[in-house]
Image: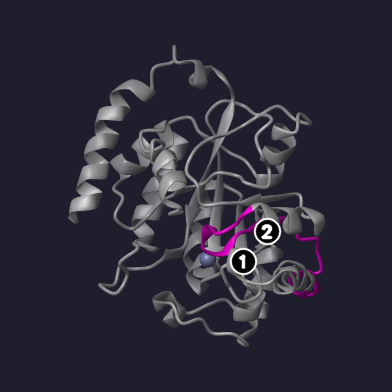
Amino acid sequence: MNCKRLVKRGIASLVDTFVSQPCLPGNRDPATRILLYHSLQCRSSADPLGLQVVPGEFERHMGFLRDNGYTVIRLSELVDGMSGKEKIGHKTVAITFDDGFLDTLNVACPVLEKFGYPATVFISSGIMRGNVRGADYWDSWEYMTRSDVKRMSEHSLFDIGSHGVSHVRLSSVSGERQSCEIRDSRAILEEVIGKKVGYFSYPHGCFDARVKKAVEDAGYNGACSSFIGMNRVSGDVFALKRTEISGFDTVADVAMKLRGAYDWLYGFQKLTGYR
Ligand SMILES: [Zn+2]
């Protein structure tokens, strides 16, 4: 295992002995953790970020949620809870997938169906259409087509969200380009699925105040970041925190992440701008 990951896991194990204490003030407030997955396939050596989670491992993660009393809710329930319209329960989790790889439909959906867990899948509309191809290493993996996305949206458990048009870092482009990425992606996805698209996920997790306002002004109900942590009542629904589950994580790591043992990384993310 790489040295950085080893250090992180060591610190998380230490933190884990303290974070699960029910007497801690934070543990008394209802809060929801959003899990972030990307691709479910056998890990390839060309995946330094660990975006690929082995399908059997994913099923074990879902089993862990079921066996340990977690309730999986939709993003809309979480956002309603954060704005006081609904009550958020303890030990609630929402599940999201970014990018729209074909294995989300072929591998994740059957597992989620088996457990009856809802999920939101964020799609970059240009990549789905095949008009845009990124230069990142994961762009050689297979993405869902329009008809795949439509098929997924027809299932009552799965919601489609927008991940921009071309997966560009929105904080590094002009206001005009930002607006196109944010608004056009939703219009295209809504045309494909014939339903409203209510949520946005910032590509690469990159956003600043200007990008956040543009998403809000475009009429979305909320947006997901890649900052780790819990989402509590009165939190910012346009900067929802998510906990990324990587291909390097064992079920024990996932359990620690769910308990908050990795949440100290938030300070590190803020400090370094790494998301
Ligand atoms: Zn992405």
The verdict on residue 65 being magenta is no
> Which mark, by number, is residue 13?
none
Residue highlighted by disc 1: 170
Residue 168 lies left or right of residue 182; in this view the side is left
Q: Is residue 198 visible in the rendered structure shown here?
A: no
Please give the label number shown on residue 211: 2
- Relative to 167, say whether 12 is above or below: above
Nearer to the camera, 201 or 154: 201
User: Which residue is farthest bottom?
Assistant: 131
User: In which image quadrant can residue 140 be found?
Assistant: bottom left
Q: Secondary structure at mark 1?
A: helix
Residue type at tag 1? Leu
In contact (CB < 8 Å): disc 2 and disc 1: yes
- Write the residue at 35% across / 63% down: 49
Q: What's the CA distance linking mark 2 and mark 1? A: 7 Å
Q: How is the image coloured?
A: one colour
Q: Position of residue 242 (x, y in %)?
A: 52, 46
Q: Which residues are magenta?
A: 188-208
